[in-house]
């Protein structure tokens, strides 16, 4: 232990953050293999075999925790669902909106409310999982629950809520002490862990002749094309020129000059959270339908409406992706604050008056840019679903999964680069201060 502490103390801040993140992801992967008490894992695993639909995507996002029915089966998704509810309430509730304007203290309170709501949602989902497992038909003579009853349901709720609470805490620790955004990194880690299994299934289908070599090459080329498209659009920006006038002395008088800078607006300002939020909402009916059975006609029709791959599912998923893309952009970018900051600092956009006109100009520009971002998200997340469900193209890796992995990787690399630049500037300032001490 002393040797480890000595080595860790010699690392730079960036190295410590990277090592902490890797250790946290390792703990997360170990926890995903801890089984839920009283559950026959082999019977539950049979339920997910060959499921490449929405529940297969849910299982991939959780790194296989759901199909293994581990204590982390619900993963981070109750927290994501709670975040959606709180953000919508913040946009409509005056009290939460005022709380958000209080700065860091308000953000801490909103995060606390999100955690409480996540625990409530997790408890409800855990009870549904326990009830569904008890109602499952036996697989090869084996029941999913070894000793059904109230005791099993209570222990399942406690275990699943505890697992989700630990995942939430781990995500927050990664965000605060590691590198990158904790929740997104955990989802990315789960997806990457399931990629080898998807590739093996693809090769197995090719080996038995169910997929032709040409189709395999086409699928691989399609995935590479999606990755290239994501890499381009995630870094694409619309730069707005900003001028700052200044006074300089010239020929005994004052002459006005203007320094120029740029306000960068990302094409996909919402990042990966739009598709993640949309997927979380679409997963809820599929999750209920997987573990809870009902003979009610209206319930069956509702579940059929949310069936993965149907045109109703594709249409609703597209609308949700577009809605959350615009919603997240509105949360991230405040045109009024930006216009006021430019006005207070003396900056202006050429041809646009400072103040209200600048705000309207930014609103229109961000709206048009977000439309392009929505089309890009639809092409990445929805088109693979159409090809898979409607045309039978066996795409084992969904576009949403590729978007999350690529987007989170690019964001993490950007943060690493920012740490390196900050360290470089700090060393330059330190050297300058040392030289200044010896000046006479």
Image (cartoon, grey):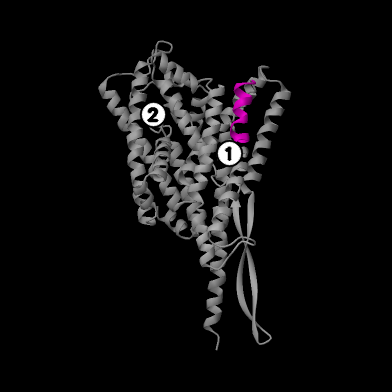
Note whether 208 is above or below 30 in the view shown: above
In the image, 250 versus 188, the foreground residue is 250
Q: Which residues are magenta?
A: 377-391
**Quick check: can you spot residue 413?**
yes
Report which residue position mark 2 lands on.
Answer: 35
Q: Residue at x 48, y 37 (%)?
A: 277
What is the secondary structure assignment of the residue under circle 2? Answer: loop
User: Is 177 displayed left or right of 260 in the figure?
Assistant: left
Q: Is residue 55 magenta?
A: no
Q: Horizontally, is 426 left or right of 291 in the view? A: right
Q: Residue 10 in the image: x percent, y percent?
A: 48, 60
**Disc 1: which residue:** 403
Q: Nearer the viewer, residue 148 or 364?
A: 364
Task: Locate residue 184 relative to residue 202 in the image: left or right.
Answer: left
Furthest toward the top, the residue is 141
Mark 1 element type: helix
Q: Provide the major secondary structure of the magenta segment.
A: helix
Residue 197, quarter of the rendered image: top right
Alpha-carbon distance for marks 1 and 2? 30 Å
The residue depicted at 33 percent of the width and 18 percent of the height is: 146
Whichever of callouts 1 and 2 sits on the residue coming sooner in the sequence is 2
Judge whether 210 appears above or below 416 on screen. Answer: above
Q: Nearer the viewer, residue 357 or 24?
A: 357
User: x, y (%) of residue 285?
Assistant: 44, 25
The disc at residue 22 is none
**Position of residue 331 measured from the top left corner of the image (x, y, whole percent):** 48, 48
Q: Is residue 363 above or below residue 251?
A: above
- Residue 264, how many percent across, how many down? 60, 55
Q: Residue at x 29, y 28 (%)?
A: 155
Q: Quadrant of the C terminus?
A: bottom right
């Amino acid at each position: 232990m002393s040797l480890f502490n000595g080595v860790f103390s010699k690392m730079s801040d960036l190295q410590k953050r990277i090592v902490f993140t890797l250790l946290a992801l390792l703990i997360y992967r170990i926890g995903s293999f801890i089984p839920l008490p009283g559950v026959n894992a082999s019977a539950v695993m049979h339920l997910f075999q060959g499921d490449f639909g929405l529940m297969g995507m849910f299982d991939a996002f959780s790194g296989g925790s759901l199909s293994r029915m581990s204590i982390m089966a619900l993963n981070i998704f109750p927290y994501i669902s709670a975040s959606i509810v709180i953000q919508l309430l913040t946009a409509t509730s005056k009290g939460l909106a005022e709380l958000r304007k209080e700065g860091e203290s308000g953000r801490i309170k909103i995060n606390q409310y999100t955690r409480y709501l996540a625990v409530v949602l997790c408890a409800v989902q855990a009870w549904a999982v326990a009830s569904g497992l008890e109602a499952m038909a036996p697989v090869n003579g084996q029941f999913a629950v070894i000793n059904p009853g109230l005791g099993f349901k209570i222990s399942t709720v406690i275990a699943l809520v505890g697992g989700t609470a630990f995942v939430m805490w781990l995500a927050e620790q990664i965000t605060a002490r590691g590198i990158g955004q904790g929740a997104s990194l955990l989802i990315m880690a789960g997806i990457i862990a399931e990629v080898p299994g998807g590739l093996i299934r693809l090769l197995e289908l090719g080996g038995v002749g169910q997929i032709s070599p040409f189709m395999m090459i086409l699928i691989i080329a399609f995935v590479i094309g999606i990755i290239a498209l994501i890499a381009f659009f995630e870094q694409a920006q619309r730069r707005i020129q900003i001028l700052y006038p200044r006074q300089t002395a010239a020929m005994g008088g004052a002459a006005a000059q203007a320094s120029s800078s740029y306000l960068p607006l990302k094409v996909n300002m919402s990042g990966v959270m739009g598709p993640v939020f949309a997927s979380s909402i679409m997963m809820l009916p599929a999750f209920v339908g997987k573990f809870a059975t009902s003979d009610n006609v209206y319930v069956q029709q509702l579940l059929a409406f949310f069936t993965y791959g149907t045109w109703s599912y594709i249409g609703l998923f597209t609308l949700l992706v577009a809605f959350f893309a615009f919603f997240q952009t509105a949360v991230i970018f405040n045109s009024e604050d930006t216009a006021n900051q430019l006005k207070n600092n003396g900056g202006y956009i050429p041809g646009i008056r400072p103040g209200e006109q600048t705000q309207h100009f930014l609103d229109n520009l961000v709206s048009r840019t977000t439309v392009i971002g929505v089309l890009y998200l639809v092409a990445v997340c929805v088109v693979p679903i159409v090809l898979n469900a409607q045309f039978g193209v066996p795409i084992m890796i969904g576009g949403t999964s590729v978007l999350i992995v690529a987007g989170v990787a690019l964001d993490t690399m950007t943060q690493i680069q920012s740490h390196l630049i900050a360290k470089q500037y700090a060393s330059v300032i330190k050297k300058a201060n040392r030289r200044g001490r010896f000046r006479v």
